[in-house]
Amino acid sequence: MMSPMKTPLSQPRAVERLVAGQATSDGAGVKLTRVLTQNLQRRLDPFLMLDAFGSDRADDYIAGFPDHPHRGFETITYMLEGRMRHRDSAGNEGLLGNGGVQWMTAGRGVIHSELPEQEEGRMEGFQLWLNLPSFDKMRAPWYRDIPSAQIPEFELEGVKVRVIAGQSHGVAGAVQREHTEPLYLDLHLAPGASFSQPLPDSHNAFVYVYRGDLQFDGGVQVPLQRMAILANTPGSEGLRFSAGSSGARAIVVAGRPLNEPIAQHGPFVMNTQAELIQAVRDFQAGVLA
Ligand code: MN
């Protein structure tokens, strides 16, 4: 039995800015909101992208993401509702279902497809891209499907906490990463419930609200479908916020910045232009498969 401990924070982080995200489509025509866009990659280092998707209309998601490559980073897909099948060139295959996570380390390269395995109903979730340190970008690919039941969770004073990565209140998440130390939590807060999480002031952090709204100290509100970038105020001890009167659901994402050059060309994220050119050549030569 897990026994989480509440840690008091006297100096929580402030909200630095709110971001609405941009409606776009990707893959073969999947409608989504790009919340963490390329211009925020430096500010939110080591995170490169966050897409939020959510629709009851099959037309918005049915085309999926047919075969495409990745190199140099990790993709983390969290499915709140829906079924998506993954297949890749390393021979991995898995079905991502309600509440499950797929964690894929592209490393030197994979080609994969992500295709809905439903023709109707709701599909909702997130895809987060986490950068790899320079020395690890060409490592062997790695992949893990984490069904909902294997994601550690606990309840604390009106908050259900699902720990996808990192650790919260003494509970270790499903995945740990040494260099970027990612924290990835899904929080379900009852009306008025508050949550706190210690975090080094150097780690970049954001919160995205997908139900209800959140209140921060000083009366700052984070409304539905907004990302709050949290200030790295020196000496701040972590995160603290409360749900509004109708409760809230939100993901919390934080990590240690790599402070390395970021060069991106579509699905390849390296440190230099020369490495991007090599990635495109390797893909064209069939080396990624
Ligand atoms: Mn992909």
Image: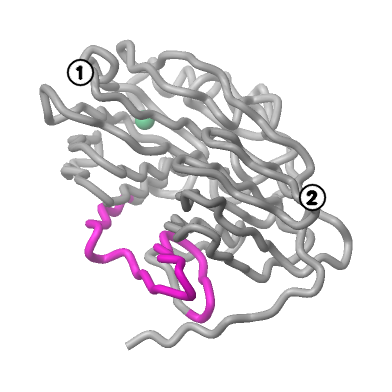
Residue 2, relative to residue 115: is it above or below?
below
Secondary structure mostly seen in magenta is strand
**Circle 2: residue type:** Ala
Q: Residues within 10 Å of mark 1 (few under 14, many from 20)?
A: some
Q: Residue at x 35, y 29 (%)?
A: 54
Residue 113, relative to residue 243: is it above or below?
above
Q: Position of residue 197 (x, y in %)?
A: 62, 68
* Visible residue check, residue 268: yes
Q: Residue at x 68, y 44 (%)?
A: 221
- Per the rendering, the mark at residue 58 is 1
Indicate which disc, 2 or 1, sits on the residue closer to the N terminus: 1
Q: Position of residue 146 (x, y in %)?
A: 27, 57
Q: Quadrant of the C terminus?
A: top left
Residue 101, relative to residue 72: is it above or below?
below
Residue 91, relative to residue 115: is it above or below?
below
Q: Residue at x 54, y 85 (%)?
A: 5
Dot 1: what SS?
Answer: helix
Please tell me whether residue 28 belongs to the stretch shown in magenta. no
Dot 2: what SS?
Answer: loop
**Residue 186 image-quadrant placement:** bottom left
Ligand 1 quadrant in view: top left
- Distance from Cα at disc 2 to Cα at disc 1: 38 Å
**Residue 123 image-quadrant placement:** top left
The magenta segment: 143-170
Q: Residue at x 27, y 51 (%)?
A: 100
Residue underneath mark 2: 231
**Circle 1: residue type:** Ala
Q: Nearer the viewer, residue 180 or 190?
A: 190
Q: Quadrant of the N terminus?
A: bottom left
Protein image colouring:
one colour
Q: Nearer the viewer, residue 22 or 29?
A: 22
* Ligand 1 within 8 angstroms of badge 1 C-beta: no
